[in-house]
Image (cartoon, rainbow, N blue to C red):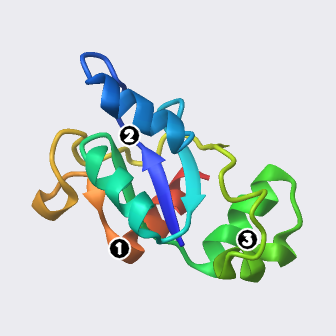
Amino acid sequence: MYAVVRIRGTINAKGEIRDTLKMLRLYHINNCTIIPETKSFKGMLQKVKDYVTWGEIDKETIEMILEKEGLDASNAEKILEGKVKDVLHLPIRLHPPIKGYKSIKKPYSMGGSLGYRGKEINELIRRML
């Protein structure tokens, strides 16, 4: 499962990008969604890579998110397996990260905050809870 966090706004963005962010249910900056690792979602992430960051989420981070939302944290394992689908696409409102983003205009591989970051997404989400 991927956790996707929106970092940038959509001023001067193409309509395709705005539509894709709506399909991912990332309506506001610092929103997060949990999506499955399917081919269609990966294509959507590539389209909006200049506006979001994403990576593989672990069980402990899902438990922390569920506790923040007031939901049953024991479902974390089921969510990772994709058995609980009603929680997956809910937008989760997070705070801006403690110590901020590195750069919202550079990709993660170049020292910024955008794009794919792998397991490091867990650290970012914990800073935002």
- Which numbered dot is residue 7? 2
Q: Assign a secondary structure to mark 1.
A: helix
The residue depicted at 15 percent of the width and 58 percent of the height is 111
Percent of width and height locating residue 88 = 68, 59
> Which residue is labeled 3 in the image?
63
109 lies left or right of 73: left
Check disc 3 and give the amino acid type.
Glu
Percent of width and height locating residue 38 = 46, 70
For the residues marked 3 and 1, what is the alpha-carbon distance in whole angstroms?
Answer: 18 Å
Which quadrant is the N terminus positioned in?
Answer: bottom right
> Which residue is labeled 1 in the image?
118
| N-terminal-most mark, 1 or 2 | 2
For the residues marked 3 and 2, what is the alpha-carbon distance in whole angstroms?
Answer: 22 Å
The residue depicted at 47 percent of the width and 71 percent of the height is 37
Q: Residues within 10 Å of mark 2 (few under 14, many from 20)?
A: many
Residue 19 falls in which quadrant of the image? Answer: top left
Q: Assign a secondary structure to mark 3.
A: helix
